[in-house]
Image (cartoon, rainbow, N blue to C red):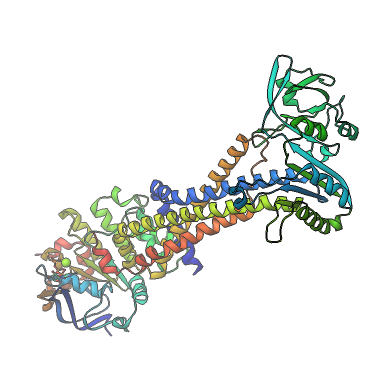
């Protein structure tokens, strides 16, 4: 059974008398351990779809089954629990708590599932070490570089061991060198069997993924396997992403 | 649930600390309100303590009789009096009186008294040998108080307070010296021990003459108003005697049945009660003012909390995105306003106590400020209530934010 499955999803935004159909009948299934890129031109509905997959927003129509549970029927608190346990969301603008240190930011999701303080500290520092930020735990977000901030955000997404990692343009605010580092981190996570969906409009980033879904006007225009990476193998791609390309 | 409460408390405290100065400003209303309650209560407690001390000397077995002019009569120009005849009448017709102590105050508040070239203004009153009990005065060594025979024979003798002695430059032991009151020479037979000050009033500026001497001094043509202090031999008869005195005086004053008493007969307990009731109405009025200030303080807190929720909309969105449930957000904001109010209450308590201590130090002979436990609990209870009542709305607003809307907020 698929890890997540959306069936004929639509999302409408009502602005006065106008109705904007940001998603117009999307059906998609994603299996465990997949590494998927969602691409498409600006305004094609990528972010809208990701927020629905991340249970941050509800679709206007259609069903969403996550891990066998029908998310469309859940109340706000049940959705909060799903976001906490099943989903790690990574934003383009990091969305860290500005007054909390890197460590505190990563500890935050664990508060919401009732993890005691000691374990919280241990698991958060482990997650930070995992993303290569073991030395910067006591820094506030504004004392960190953009790439470091995004690593903190990734650690925060990972700390609850979610079923799926969702990233909306995670490198959109980063320079090309940092982008390569962050993508290397995603590749490594995928090699560790983490399911990942990345929204991006950059072909170089999509090239890291094994499956590429292209959207157009709120529909899926194309859904294909990425032959180049698939041939090289994920683990190989993770270590030497550049060398895979001919 | 306990876990959530502790974590929300931790978050609330962190947020209060992060906005130190604003938190202080937020609680200012509560601080002032609570400080006002505490200072007020402490000062009123001090007053009632002092007043009780003052009346304690009267004893449980005493009755006071004094004139009382109802306002309507006063407007008609009538002034009620207790006359020397009334004193005699009570003495003759009422059984069971151990002592009767009439006190006749001079018409003017202050009268000139002279010794040699010195002169001073003082309060002159006339009374009998039982007065020291009532007036709580003690004689300094070497002198004596007015005796019964001094009174009966209208001797020109006087007992003076220490302030009068100083003002007239009389010797340390003034006994035997003659002072002049008006045109009359009066011999000093005793000096009262200094009593110090009460509410900033010097308690030693007085001259006491024998009652009858005083009467003849002020002239028999004027109708003096007398204050009577009675000591009852049998305390169980007190109420019965009170009624008999009322009947007697009503008859003597020829009051028709439709008119109110033009005098008051009170037990010392009733006297204290009068003061206590005055104090409680003062307390009530102050309490009203304080409630308003706490209300205003509460609205201030709600206002700042609403601003704070708006300001932190994005943060709330982030917390929701990573899994915060509604009650977790609600508790955090509710605790924030609750803690703010309690901290305000604590600061107000300290400030109010400081004011009370300063006030009691500034007023001579005022007892040390005491803040009773009930006032402390009331102040904290009220602060907590304000925090909850005015915190719930902003907290609910924060808790019910839609995660995606909150995240998009800039
Ligand atoms: N809250 C909203 N209210 C109204 N319209 C919205 C809202 N959010 C998105 N839209 C509209 O829905 C459409 C899809 O938006 P979405 O953000 O999903 O695009 P996108 O593919 O992520 O684009 P980009 O690459 O620029 O981020 C757009 O036309 C956008 O204007
Ligand atoms: Mg987008």
Number of numbered labels in the structure image: 0
Q: Residue at x 70, y 53 (%)?
A: B273
> Is residue B251 something one can see in this rendering?
yes
Residue at the limit of the structure toward the top, as seen here: B117
Quadrant containing the C terminus of chain B in the rendered view: bottom left
Up the image or down, A228 lies above or below A183; here it is: below
Quadrant in the rendering for residue A107: bottom left
Decide if residue B383 is on the left or right side of residue B91.
left
State which image quarter holds ligand 1: bottom left
Which of these two is toward me, A186 or B383? B383
Residue A188 at x, y = what percent?
A: 26, 64
Decide if residue A237 is on the left or right side of residue B245.
left
Up the image or down, A212 lies above or below A171; here it is: below
Which of these two is toward me, A195 or B378? B378
Decide if residue B188 is on the left or right side of residue A197.
right
Up the image or down, A82 lies above or below A205; here it is: below
Up the image or down, A244 lies above or below B40; here it is: below
Which of these two is toward me, A187 or B208? B208
Residue B304 at x, y = what percent?
A: 37, 55
Which of these two is toward me, B270 or B1? B270
> Is residue A190 something one can see in this rendering?
no
Residue B359 at x, y = what percent?
A: 59, 38
Q: Residue at x 79, y 46 (%)?
A: B86
Residue A9 at x, y = what percent?
A: 19, 82
Decide if residue A87 is on the left or right side of residue B44.
left
């Amino acid at each position: 059974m698929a890890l997540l499955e959306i069936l004929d999803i639509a999302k409408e935004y009502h602005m006065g008398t106008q109705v904007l159909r940001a998603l117009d009948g999307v059906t998609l299934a994603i299996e465990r351990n997949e590494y998927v890129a969602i691409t498409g031109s600006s305004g094609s509905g990528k972010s809208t779809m990701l927020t629905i997959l991340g249970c941050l927003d509800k679709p206007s129509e259609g069903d969403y089954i996550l891990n066998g549970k029908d998310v469309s029927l859940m109340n706000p608190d049940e959705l909060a629990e799903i976001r906490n346990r099943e989903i790690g969301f990574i934003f383009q603008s990091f969305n860290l708590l500005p007054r909390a240190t890197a460590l505190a930011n990563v500890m935050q999701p664990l508060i919401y599932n009732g993890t005691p303080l000691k374990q919280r500290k241990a698991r958060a520092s482990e997650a930070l070490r995992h993303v290569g930020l073991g030395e910067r735990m006591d820094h506030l977000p504004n004392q960190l570089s953009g790439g470091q901030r995004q690593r903190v955000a990734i650690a925060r997404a990972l700390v609850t061991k979610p079923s799926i990692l969702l990233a909306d343009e995670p490198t959109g605010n980063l320079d090309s060198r940092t982008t390569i580092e962050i993508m290397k981190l995603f590749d490594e996570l995928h090699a560790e069997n983490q399911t990942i969906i990345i929204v991006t409009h950059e072909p170089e980033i999509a090239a890291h993924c094994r499956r590429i879904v292209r959207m157009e006007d709120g529909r899926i225009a194309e859904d294909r396997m990425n032959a180049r990476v698939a041939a090289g193998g994920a683990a190989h791609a993770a270590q030497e992403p550049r060398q895979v390309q001919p | 649930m306990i876990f959530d409460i502790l974590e929300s408390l931790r978050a609330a405290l962190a947020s209060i600390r992060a906005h130190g100065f604003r938190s202080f400003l937020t609680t200012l209303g509560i601080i002032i309100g609570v400080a006002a309650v505490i200072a007020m209560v402490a000062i009123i407690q001090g007053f009632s303590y002092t007043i009780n001390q003052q009346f304690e000397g009267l004893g449980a077995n005493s009755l006071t009789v004094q004139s009382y002019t109802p306002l309507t009569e006063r407007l008609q120009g009538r002034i009620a009096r207790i006359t020397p005849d009334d004193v005699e009448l009570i003495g003759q017709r009422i059984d069971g009186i151990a002592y009767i102590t009439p006190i006749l105050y001079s018409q003017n508040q202050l009268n000139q008294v002279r010794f040699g070239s010195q002169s001073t203004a003082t309060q002159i009153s006339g009374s009998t040998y039982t007065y020291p009990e009532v007036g709580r005065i003690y004689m300094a060594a070497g002198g004596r108080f007015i005796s019964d025979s001094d009174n009966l024979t209208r001797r020109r003798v006087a007992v003076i307070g220490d302030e009068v002695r100083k003002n007239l430059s009389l010797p340390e032991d003034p006994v035997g010296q003659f002072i002049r009151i008006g045109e009359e020479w009066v011999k000093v037979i005793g000096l009262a021990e200094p009593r110090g000050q009460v509410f900033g009033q010097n308690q030693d500026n007085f001259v006491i003459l024998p009652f009858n001497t005083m009467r003849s001094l002020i002239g028999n043509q004027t109708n003096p108003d007398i204050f009577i202090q009675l000591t009852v031999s049998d305390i169980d008869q007190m109420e019965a005697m009170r009624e008999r005195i009322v009947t007697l005086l009503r008859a003597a004053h020829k009051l028709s049945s439709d008119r109110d008493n033009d005098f008051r007969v009170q037990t010392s307990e009733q006297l204290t009660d009068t003061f206590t009731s005055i104090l409680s109405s003062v307390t009530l009025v102050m309490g009203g003012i304080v409630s308003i200030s706490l209300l205003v303080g509460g609205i201030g807190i709600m206002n700042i909390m609403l601003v704070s929720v708006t300001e932190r909309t994005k943060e709330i969105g982030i917390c929701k995105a990573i899994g915060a449930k509604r009650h977790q957000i609600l508790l955090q904001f509710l605790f924030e306003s609750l803690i703010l109010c309690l901290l305000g209450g604590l600061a107000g308590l300290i400030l109010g106590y400081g004011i009370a201590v300063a006030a009691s130090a500034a007023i001579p002979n005022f007892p040390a400020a005491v803040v009773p436990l009930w006032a402390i609990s009331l102040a904290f209870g009220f602060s907590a209530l304000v925090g909850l009542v005015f915190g719930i709305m902003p907290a609910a607003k924060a808790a019910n934010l839609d995660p995606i809307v909150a995240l998009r907020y800039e």
